Structures are given as structure tokens and as C-alpha cells.
Amino acid sequence: MSTTISANPRAGAISEAKAFSDATSVPWFVWALFTAVVSVVVGGYWDISWHMSIGRDTFWTPAHIAIQMCGIIAGLSCGFLIFSCTFGNYPEARDASVRVWNFRGPLGGFIAAWGGATMLASAPFDNWWHNAYGLDVAIFSPPHVVLDGGVLAIQVGAVVLMASTRNRSQGILREKLDWFLLLVGGMIMMLAMTVVWESTYRVLMHTPQCYRAIAIVAPVVLAGFAGISERRWASTIVAGIYSLYAIAMLWILPLFPATPKLGPVYQNVTHMVPMEFPVLLIVPAICLDLLRPRIAHLGKWPQALAMGSVFLVTLLAVQWPFASFLISPASANWFFGTKYFAYFSSPTGLDVRHIFFSGDRDPLRFGFVMLQALLLGILSSILGLMWGDWVKKIRR
């Protein structure tokens, strides 16, 4: 057996790049980061359910382990990828890499590796915080903010790494990687909606603050992945994945037994309590996919103006009446899940009594907050459009 060394390094690099672009198997690092993102989404939902059903009894809950596995998988896989590129064990990736502190690797790999290290650093900080200030104190505590920063970096890194790999690929592999991007988009939408979950309880769905919160996080994801993906119905697919995942967890978790370990206990909880029925983002997503070809010739800001406006109007048109159904006893079944209450839910709570939060009924105040929602939806859309354009062009 003999080994032939090309006399022309550039020709060798070109042939390696061509071989990569003609491949059909999804690279291992794409699978690794996809697994990391799914792990944190499952762990995050599970952790919230654990807190509502059992309470935080120890740091080493299965949900916490699933969350931290995201950081471990992303950190180890991207660290290995970076070292392989730096020391020449992965030449095809090295040819599409960037240099950071004398190390070489894909840009998305560096971002995700930093996110993994940040997540792992937050773990002992979070454990100390709970021991010092209580088991269930606040969602946005300092260690949770550090953790969320790491999760965000891994999400961004995964999208950048998958997109740069897709942008250098052709044929079947390119189509596969585009689907991976959309699957990750659905997971990112789930995480984004979880961030604003406390502002989108069903009892708050007749307040403008609810729609303002959704307008901050949802349009950037829908517009971003519509620009990143090469598929006509990208926004619809992302919203559909989010909806199917949330509904699946709503139906599956109550099948498992649970007993509260913290007090006070106001509700008779015998099984895991899920989060609420997903927001009907699928309808605005369909409308955005129908709208995009008609405004593609416009500049970014006119597109964002149209997309932000359509998003808010269609969301209000479907979610407002649907909220009236969710707040009624008619939805108190396993399908819609409004019969489940956290163990600490007071018997006099609005959700238990099936009553909307009245809030400030001043029409001027209502209109002012809705105007904020519109402006934030437009700003979120422009950020998504800009992000999508950048990611679609990246190759390293």
C-alpha cells in the first residue's frame, strides 16, 4: 500500500472540499450539537414540571442532569473538533475554519464550546445559590442568567456550525442539513417561549403585556429561520415543531407519578404537572410564509414592518378567542391540559377559578402597550431578517 502526497496543497484542499460537498452522511458534530440542543430543551421543560410537581429537592435531579448534558456534549464535541482542526486530524474542517488564540476551528464550534464551558461553570454556582437562598427562589437568579447565556451560545453555535456546513454542501446532504436547521429552530422557539412563559399564562392572554412578550421573542426566530432555510414553508415548519413538541410533553408527562416534597401544598398532585398548551404561533407562521414572496422585493425595514404587523394581528385574531376557551372549564381535560395545577397553586388563584387577570382596563394604557408590542415585533423581525441573511452566507 502506498500513500500519494499531492504536490499542490491548494489542489489537495480543493479536492477535499469537493469530497465533503459531495458527501451524503451528516457529520458527527452536527449530530452532537443537535443532541445537545434537544437535551437542554427536554431538560428545561422537565425541570419546570419537576418544580411544579415535586419541588427542587436536590441538584442531581434527572432534569438538571439533562440540562447539564447539553453543556457537556457541546463542550466536549466542539473542543474535540477545534483540536482536530488545529492539529490537522480533520483537514476538511480545517480548510473551512477560523483562527482564535492560535486555535483553528469552525466559528460555530468556538461559540458552542464557550457556551458549554459557561453552562458547566454555572452548575456549582446554582447549587450554592439554592443552598444559600432557598430551594425555589427565582427563575432569573444570577446563576440562571449565566446558565441561560451558555444555552444561548450553544444554540447560536449550533445554527452557525450547521449552516456553514450546509452552505458548503450539495445534493442530499444539503437537504438533510437544512432539515436539521429547522428542527433546531423548533427547539429554539420552545426555549424562547419558555423564557417568556410567566408572561403568557392563559390567565394573562387578555392583557397586552402577554402579546408584547411574545412579540419580543417569536418574530426573530420565525424571520431568522425563514431566511436561513431554503424551504418555502420554513416559518410554518419551525412553529409546527414547537407546537408538536409542547403538545407531546403536555400529554406524556402526566403519565408519570409525582409527589410534592416542599410546602405549602395546596393541590392534590399525584402525577407530573406539565406546562400549558402552546401558543398558536402556527397561524402567524403560515401567514408570514404566505407574505414573504410578496414582499421579497422590498428593503429590510419595509419587510420587517409588514412581518411584525401581520404577526401581531394574526396572533391576536386566533389567540384571544382561543384564550377564552382555555380559561373555561370546557378545556379542563387531558387534551388541552388546563386541569393540571402546580402543587403550590392557591385555591383562590385565577387559574384555579378559571378567571382572566383583569389588569389595567384603561383603553389608553391598553393601546400604548399594544403599540409597544407592534414596535417590538417589527424590531424582532428586522433582527431575524438580518440574522438570517448573515447565517445563510457564512461558510466557516
Image: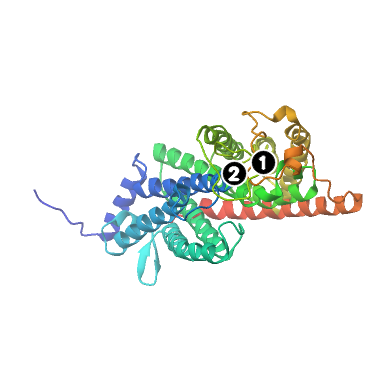
Label 2 near label 1: C-beta < 8 Å?
yes
Residue shown at the point (56%, 34%) measured from the top left: 244
Residue tagged 1: 292
Q: Which mark is in front, 1 or 2?
A: 2
Q: Is residue 370 visible?
A: yes
Label 2 element class? helix
Please, what is the three-letter code of the amino acid marked with disc 2? Ala
Cα separation, mark 1 vs mark 2, equals 9 Å
In the depicted view, which residue is nearer to us: 66 or 378? 66
User: What x and y, as percent, mark residue 46?
Assistant: 52, 44
Q: Is 350 left, or right, of 11 in this rendering?
A: right
Q: Which mark is residue 182?
A: none
- Residue furthest to the left in view is 1
Question: Looking at the image, is 272 positioned above or below residue 110?
Answer: above
Describe the colour scheme in one phrase: rainbow
Quadrant, the C terminus: bottom left
- Residue furthest to the right in view is 363
Residue shown at the point (80%, 45%) measured from the top left: 357
Categorize mark 1 by other alpha carbons within 10 Å: few (<14), some (14-19), many (20+): some
In the depicted view, which residue is nearer to us: 28 or 386? 28
Label 1 element class? helix
In the depicted view, which residue is nearer to us: 78 or 98? 78
Please, what is the three-letter code of the amino acid marked with disc 1? Arg
Whichever of callouts 1 and 2 sits on the residue coming sooner in the sequence is 2
User: What x and y, as percent, mark residue 317?
Assistant: 78, 36
- Residue furthest to the bottom in view is 101
In the depicted view, which residue is nearer to us: 51 or 207? 51
Residue tagged 2: 226
Q: Is 303 left, or right, of 364 in this rendering?
A: left
